[in-house]
């Protein structure tokens, strides 16, 4: 049986990393072979592309940023395809949805990003889960994280922009949004398992 490909998406500081870790464990507890992957940074090539992007974001055009991300995802798809063929459920930290949000919707370049993604022939996810959270909670969590990157939101306005962009893509097929504001990670896992 071919494994399912599940994406966990959303604004930073909504609990994605915790949910991914616990979802993989929950799937394994159900007797399902499961593993986690990252859309950017799963392969050596992807790690190098992500590093280049983070170090050069300010000098790269929006189109170049989108191309770098898509390039890294195409490379990750090779590994993903093997995992799926082996029957693994793959839980992925972000995917092309982030590119739609950050390089598409937020930069008023959705048409450009959609065109590049449609030409990329990326593997379609079985389910995309977008985690959302109140802006005030996100801002509090931001204060606790020592390490950030250039794509992390810097203000309440930026958090709202990102959340609203994810709301737009939450309407897509095989996509659900879960508000994690008042939920434990266990509650979130239970909801996701209900969709699988």
Image: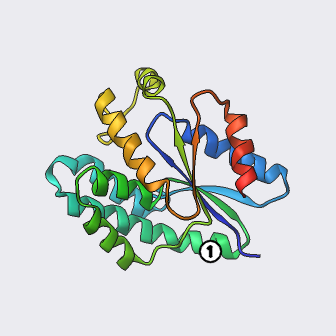
Of the pair 127 and 95, the residue shown nearer to us: 127
- Locate the N terminus and report the quarter of the image it occupies: bottom right
Give the residue displayed 38% in from the left and 43% down from the top: 164
Mark 1, residue position: 82
Give the residue displayed 52% in from the left and 73% down from the top: 123
In the image, residue 31 above or below residue 190 = below
Q: Residues within 10 Å of mark 1 (few under 14, many from 20)?
A: few
- Mark 1: which secondary structure? helix
Residue 38 locus on image (x, y percent): 51, 55
| Residue 46 as seen in the image, left or right of residue 178 | left
Residue 84 locus on image (x, y percent): 66, 71
Q: How is the image coloured?
A: rainbow
Give the residue displayed 71% in from the left and 66% down from the top: 88
In the image, residue 135 above or below residue 121 = above
Give the residue displayed 17% in from the left and 55% down from the top: 60
| Residue 118 as seen in the image, left or right of residue 36 | left
Of the pair 102 and 1, the residue shown nearer to us: 102
In the image, residue 75 above or below residue 169 = below
Observer able to see residue 40: no
């Amino acid at each position: 049986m071919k494994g399912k490909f599940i994406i966990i998406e959303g604004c930073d500081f909504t609990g994605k990393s915790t949910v991914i870790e616990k979802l993989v464990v929950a799937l394994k507890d159900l007797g399902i072979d499961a593993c986690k992957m990252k859309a950017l940074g799963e392969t050596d090539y992807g790690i190098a592309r992500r590093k280049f992007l983070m170090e050069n974001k300010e000098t790269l055009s929006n189109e170049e940023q989108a191309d770098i991300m898509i390039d890294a995802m195409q490379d990750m798809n090779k590994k993903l395809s093997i995992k799926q063929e082996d029957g693994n459920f793959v839980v992925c930290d972000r995917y092309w949805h982030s590119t739609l949000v950050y390089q598409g919707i937020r930069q008023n370049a959705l048409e450009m990003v959609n065109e590049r993604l449609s030409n990329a022939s990326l593997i379609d996810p079985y389910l995309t889960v977008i985690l959302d959270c109140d802006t005030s909670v996100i801002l509090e969590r931001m204060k606790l994280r020592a390490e950030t990157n250039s794509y992390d939101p810097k203000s309440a306005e930026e958090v709202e922009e990102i959340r609203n962009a994810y709301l737009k893509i939450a309407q897509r097929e095989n996509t659900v949004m879960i508000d994690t504001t008042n939920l434990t990670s266990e509650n979130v896992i239970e909801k996701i398992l209900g969709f699988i």
